[in-house]
């Protein structure tokens, strides 16, 4: 996302730049450009997994982004978690917070590896950040990043649900690194 007013000019010329306003934010206007191939990736991942948005952004920001990437709520439903939902977690995220019954069946895609500490980092598939407004990651490269992630997720899903069914997604993830 960008809070730079220059993004407004891009929003006027590109149909896939989305604008929303966050109340009480230092810079209330936000523009986001979705990573190329994101919708296809999310639809394919949703066929295999239950998806949750987990962000260090505010509650309002998380839901605004969710409305852009999943306007009808078919992919994430109400599974949107923000820093406001976990005020005791300052510089880290916790799968235990999301899955109090255990994290063995969870996988993480995140562009910030530093917020996942301890054993839960074994569940992490890092994704390179996409910075459209700074133009640091080309669209073609960004799309291939999601294709790689999807191939890895499919391999983990297949390995996890083979006979006999696995008990630990992290072990399967480590075994199938594509």
Image (cartoon, rainbow, N blue to C red):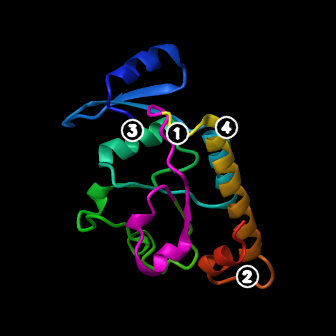
Disc 1 on helix, strand or loop? Answer: helix
Specify the quadrant that holds the N terminus.
top left
Q: Pointer 3: residues within 10 angstroms few (<14), some, or many (20+)?
A: some
If you read the primary sequence from the N terminus, does the residue marked by circle 1 or circle 2 appear first? 1
Kind of element beneath mark 4: helix
User: Residue 127's image quarter?
Assistant: bottom right
Disc 4 designates what residue?
Answer: 140
Q: Is residue 86 magenta?
A: no
Residue that label 1 marks: 69
- Tell me where the magenta segment starts and ends, as one range: 110-134
Please state, as top left, top right, bottom left or bottom right, where the C terminus lies in the image: bottom right
Determine the image quadrant of residue 35.
top right
Task: Using the image as rendered, state which of residue 128 and residue 125 is in the foreground.
Answer: 128
Residue that appears at 70% across and 78% down: 175
The residue that appears at 53% across and 36% down in the rendered structure is 34
Q: CA distance from mark 4 to mark 3?
A: 26 Å
Is 122 included in the stretch rendered in magenta? Answer: yes
Image-based side of 91 in relation to 148, left or right:
left
What residue does disc 2 label?
Answer: 165
Please tell me whether mark 2 or mark 4 is closer to you in this view.
4
């Amino acid at each position: 996302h960008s809070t730079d007013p220059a993004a407004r000019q891009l929003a006027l010329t590109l149909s896939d730049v989305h604008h929303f306003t966050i109340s009480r934010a230092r810079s209330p206007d936000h523009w986001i450009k979705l990573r190329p191939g994101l919708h296809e990736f999310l639809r394919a991942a949703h066929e295999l997994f239950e998806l949750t948005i987990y962000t260090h952004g505010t509650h309002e920001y998380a839901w605004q982004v969710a409305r852009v990437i999943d306007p009808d709520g078919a992919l994430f439903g109400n599974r949107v978690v923000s820093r406001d939902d976990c005020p005791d977690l300052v510089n880290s995220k916790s799968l235990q917070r999301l899955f109090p019954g255990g994290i063995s069946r969870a996988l993480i895609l995140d562009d910030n590896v530093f917020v996942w500490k301890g054993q839960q980092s074994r569940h992490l598939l890092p994704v390179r950040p996409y910075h459209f407004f700074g133009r640091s990651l080309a669209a073609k490269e960004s799309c291939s990043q999601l294709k790689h992630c999807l191939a890895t997720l499919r391999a983990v899903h297949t390995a996890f649900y083979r006979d006999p069914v696995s008990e630990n997604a992290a072990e399967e993830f480590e075994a199938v690194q594509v």
